[in-house]
């Protein structure tokens, strides 16, 4: 299984492959400036570079896998029991809920999640994300998965009270700087197990908070790609964050919001573990 990462080391942003020996720096071996450029080129052969260790893990800072993504598209309420969590007796949605995130709202593996001073309602949402590999518009569901380069993990962290500032949007509460994380790596789709039944779990300080499987998604991966591409062109490196199961902090009574020092861990079948520590932001 290949683990493709973007990282900062020796004074510059780089990308490469993480393996047992360390990290192979593909940015110096392939001629591509970023992982997004490699994905756009469709150059799978470049992933077979000699696995020499140019860096060890402790010499690098993990970035989000595609730190220069053109779009980070996030889906809300996409697990069947998540809709029931709202306790409003509503039917399952006919279409996906959608919002976007800025690249600056996300950090990489082991980087701190910043608890903002403006709120005490800082929350977590473990999710699986798709990384687009081939551009497309009005993509059919039958052809959708051929447009996917690989998958990664996301903690789609948010500030709950700021999500309620606007009448029709949640954008404010979803885009505080360094409020969420993504990574630690992209696994190419050909290295993944059956995508229709991936286990997804989120832990806070080793307490299991979220647990579900992609078999319970309201809108499967292929539908999301087809739906989104109806009104926008999906580009290589675009990320689709596909929704979170029940069990985020806001859904407990009383709520279990994140505090300074909390450790959030997201894991899914075939994708490893994304882990970050919450730190209070000082201003």
Image (cartoon, rainbow, N blue to C red):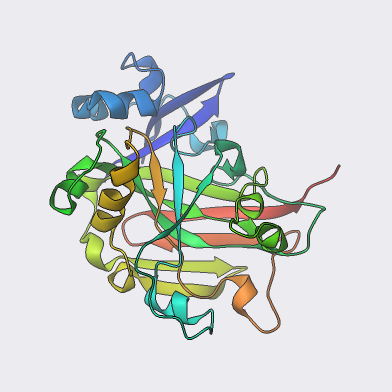
**Residue 119 sits in quarter:** bottom right
The C terminus lies in which quarter of the figure? top right
* Residue 271 shows up from this direction: yes
Q: What residue occupies the far left of the structure in this picture? A: 142
**Residue 16 sits in quarter:** top left
Vertical relation: 111 (above or below) 35: below
**Residue 213 sits in quarter:** bottom left
Q: Nearer the viewer, residue 91 or 148?
A: 91
Question: What is the x, y in percent for residue 112?
Answer: 66, 47
| Residue at 39% from the left image edge and 48% from the top image edge | 240
| Residue at 46% from the left image edge and 82% from the top image edge | 84
Q: Nearer the viewer, residue 36 or 56?
A: 36
Q: Nearer the viewer, residue 242 or 17?
A: 242
* Residue 187 shows up from this direction: no
Question: What is the x, y in percent for residue 12?
Answer: 55, 19
**Left or right: 175 in relation to 237:** right
Q: What residue occupies the far right of the structure in this picture? A: 283
| Residue at 23% from the left image edge and 43% from the top image edge | 138
Question: What is the x, y in percent for residue 208?
Answer: 53, 75
Vertical relation: 3 (above or below) 218: above
**Left or right: 9 in relation to 138:** right
Question: What is the x, y in percent for residue 217?
Answer: 33, 69
Vertical relation: 11 (above or below) 47: above
């Amino acid at each position: 299984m290949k683990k493709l990462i973007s990282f900062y080391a020796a004074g510059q942003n780089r990308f490469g492959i993480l393996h047992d020996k360390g990290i192979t720096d593909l940015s110096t071996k392939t001629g591509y400036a970023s992982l997004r450029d490699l994905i756009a080129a469709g150059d799978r052969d470049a992933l077979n570079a000699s696995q020499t260790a140019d860096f060890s893990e402790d010499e690098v800072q993990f970035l989000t896998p595609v730190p220069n993504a053109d779009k980070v598209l996030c889906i809300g309420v996409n697990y069947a029991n998540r809709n029931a969590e709202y306790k409003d007796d509503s039917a399952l949605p006919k279409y996906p809920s959608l919002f976007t995130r800025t690249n600056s709202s996300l950090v990489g593996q082991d980087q701190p999640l910043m608890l903002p001073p403006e709120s005490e309602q800082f929350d977590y949402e473990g999710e699986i994300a798709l990384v687009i590999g081939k551009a497309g518009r009005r993509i059919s569901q039958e052809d959708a998965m051929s447009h996917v380069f690989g998958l990664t993990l996301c903690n789609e962290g948010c500030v709950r009270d700021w999500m309620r500032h606007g009448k029709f949007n949640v954008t404010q509460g979803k885009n505080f700087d360094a409020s969420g994380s993504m990574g630690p790596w992209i696994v190419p789709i050909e290295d993944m197990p059956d995508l229709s039944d991936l286990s997804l779990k989120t832990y806070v300080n080793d307490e299991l908070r979220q647990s579900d499987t992609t078999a319970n998604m309201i809108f499967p991966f292929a539908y999301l790609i087809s739906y989104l591409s109806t009104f926008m062109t999906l580009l290589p490196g675009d990320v689709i964050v596909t929704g979170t199961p029940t069990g985020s902090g806001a859904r407990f009574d009383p709520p279990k919001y994140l505090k300074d020092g909390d450790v959030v861990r997201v894991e899914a079948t075939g994708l490893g573990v994304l882990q970050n520590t919450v730190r209070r932001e000082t201003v």
